[in-house]
Amino acid sequence: MEAKTINIYIKTPARLHLGLIDMNGEMGRLFGGLGVGIDHPNVIIKAQTADSLKITGKKTSLAKAVTERFFTKYNNISPKVHLDIIETIPCHTGLGSGTQFALSIAVALAKISHINASVPELAEIVGRAKRTSVGTSIFQYGGFVVDGGKNQKTPTTAPPLIFHHPFPETWRFIVASPNQPKGLANAEEQYAFDKLTIMPAQNVGQICRLIMLKLLPALTEHDIESFGDALTKIQILTGNHLAAAQGGIYASSIATECIKFMTQTGAYGVGQSSWGPALYAIVKQNDANTFLAKVKTHLKNGAGGEAFIAKANNQGAVIKVEV
């Protein structure tokens, strides 16, 4: 009997990384992360059973590398699949492109190959969740997530998801990417973390207090003022510690100027996603279009760049399987 053809469609969210919790590690866990899924840009792929491995579309070399990692783990399975990469998230911009790209391919390959593996397991196989599981959790669930940090006794295991909550539908992000160098990644990122000093326990405690007693309660109560204030303060504490690697609280003087402008323009909260260059401001839905126009004018009159409105993705990746 001829095997049935399986068709897979996957569309991922992007993610904003909103900060790290613990760069001290004396309690046995390191990092911990905050993040939220946003509705665009997206990774979109299609996969179909085939006679052999075929990869078409965008970023085929990167897709091949992910596929090779997958089939190195599952080396008893022949790679009989056609992957078509339709859309991708711009790489090294702070929007989570690597994790969403790798997971979309890994999930498609697992379903085509009839492999029953969880998303966190697949993340480890394709080399994601090395520091935080923010991107992995957003792929699975969307919304606002917090992970519990990397257990230093089992450093290859993905950090556990400890908090997940839908992000308010009436809040918006203005995402701005000024023209500046792309953020750190791969070996450069590892080098940056390796040369950082240990974050003082007092600062870690302050971040934890802001999260537990201001940020999360404000999220659940839809209090945008308190949420934004807490997030901005967490970003400053994190950025101060990362200043040795990126030159300041934010990745450049251009980013600092843009953050200052968005604050003065009335954002409830501001920050830099991961190493940037993506920056974000939290505003109410009714104010988003006016705020975006002002940010675009600021960029046009300065370094240049792009900006867009994003709403939260509260469902995670869309995965459709047809047999």
Image (cartoon, rainbow, N blue to C red):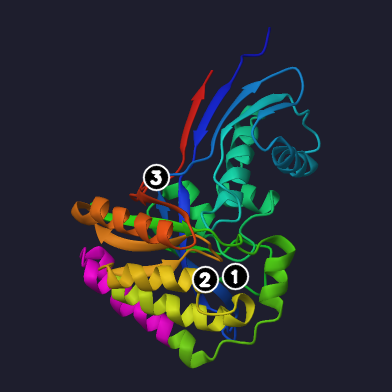
Which residues are drawn in magenta? Answer: 206-227
For marks 3 and 1 on the same chain, the one whose residue lies earlier in the sequence: 3
For marks 2 and 3 on the same chain, the one whose residue lies earlier in the sequence: 2
Say above or below: 223 vs 63. Answer: below
Tags 1 and 2 in contact by the CB under 8 Å rule? no
Task: Compare residues 169 and 244 and report the one nearer the observer.
Answer: 244
**Quarter of the image where the N terminus is located:** top right
- Cα–Cα gap, marks 2 and 3: 23 Å
Task: Compare residues 202 and 125 and report the one nearer the observer.
Answer: 202
Name the residue carrying label 1: 150
Res. 39 mark: 3
Name the residue type under label 1: Lys
Query: Dot 3: what SS?
Result: loop
Residue 214 locus on image (x, y percent): 29, 77
Name the residue type under label 2: Gly
Task: Compare residues 184 and 7 and report the one nearer the observer.
Answer: 184
Name the residue type under label 3: Asp
Residue drawn 43% across the image and 75% down it: 235
- Cα–Cα gap, marks 1 and 2: 7 Å
Residue 38 locus on image (x, y percent): 40, 50
Q: Which of the 4 image quarters holds residue 209?
A: bottom left
Residue 150 locus on image (x, y percent): 59, 70
Res. 296 mark: none
Name the residue carrying label 2: 32
Say above or below: 84 vs 279. Answer: above
